[in-house]
Image: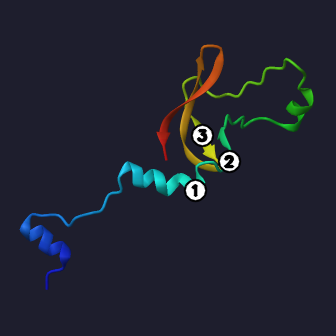
Amino acid sequence: MAGATGVAAETGTLPSVSVPSDAEEDAQWKPVMELPCTLVADLPVPAFKIADLLKLRIGSVIDAGWHVGRDVPLRLNGLLIGWSEFEVVEKNLAVRLTELV
């Protein structure tokens, strides 16, 4: 007994799939487009200790031990959504998305 997949394979045609248009997709997202969310680029400092915290002063430089060019986690409301790298755009620090999870 051939199922729908077997028939499609035998005839060389694929079953039709409904793909929403851009306008339909935009309409689906409209109710949530203005909801606030928090986007965070994490720069982990794995060897940081309470003793290091107590030594912090204005102007202190914290060595993150993170290599330049190494991607940092990008989180949306705490959920990992991708990886990014820091870069300077004019006089601002920016984040460039390098990979989506």
Q: Which residue is mark 1?
A: 31
The structure residue drawn at horizontal position 64% and vertical position 28%, both measured from the top left corner, is 66
Is residue 26 left or right of 32 when viewed as pictured? left
- In the rendered structure, which disc, 2 or 3, sits on the residue that comes first in sequence? 2
Rounded to the nearest angstrom, the CA distance separating label 3 from label 1 is 28 Å
Mark 2 vs mark 3, foreground winner is 2
Going by the numbered disc 2, the residue's amino acid type is Pro
Secondary structure of the residue carrying tag 2 is loop
Q: Residues within 10 Å of mark 2 (few under 14, many from 20)?
A: few
Crowd rating for badge 1 (residues with CA inside 10 Å; few <14, some 14–19, many 20+): few
- Residue at image location 40% in from the left, 50% down from the top: 23
The residue under label 1 is which amino acid type? Pro
Expressed as whole percent of the image width and height from the top left, the position of residue 94 reads 61, 25
Tell me which label, 1 or 2, sits earlier in the chain: 1
Q: Is residue 18 above or below residue 47?
A: below
Dots 3 and 1: beta carbons under 8 Å?
A: no
9 sits left or right of 88 in the view: left
Relative image position of residue 64 (x, y in whole percent): 70, 28
Question: Which corner quadrant of the image does residue 24 belong to?
Answer: bottom left
Q: Earlier in the sequence, mark 3 or mark 1?
A: 1
User: At label 3, which amino acid type do we have?
Assistant: Pro
Tell me the residue that label 2 is attached to: 36
Element type at marker 1?
A: helix
Task: Using the rendered view, name the quadrant where residue 5 is placed.
Answer: bottom left
Q: How is the image coloured?
A: rainbow
Cα–Cα span, label 2 and label 3: 20 Å
* Residue 70 placement (x, y as % from top left): 55, 29
- Measured as percent of width and height from the top left, residue 67 is found at 60, 25
Q: Is residue 8 above or below residue 81?
A: below
Disc 3 designates what residue? 73
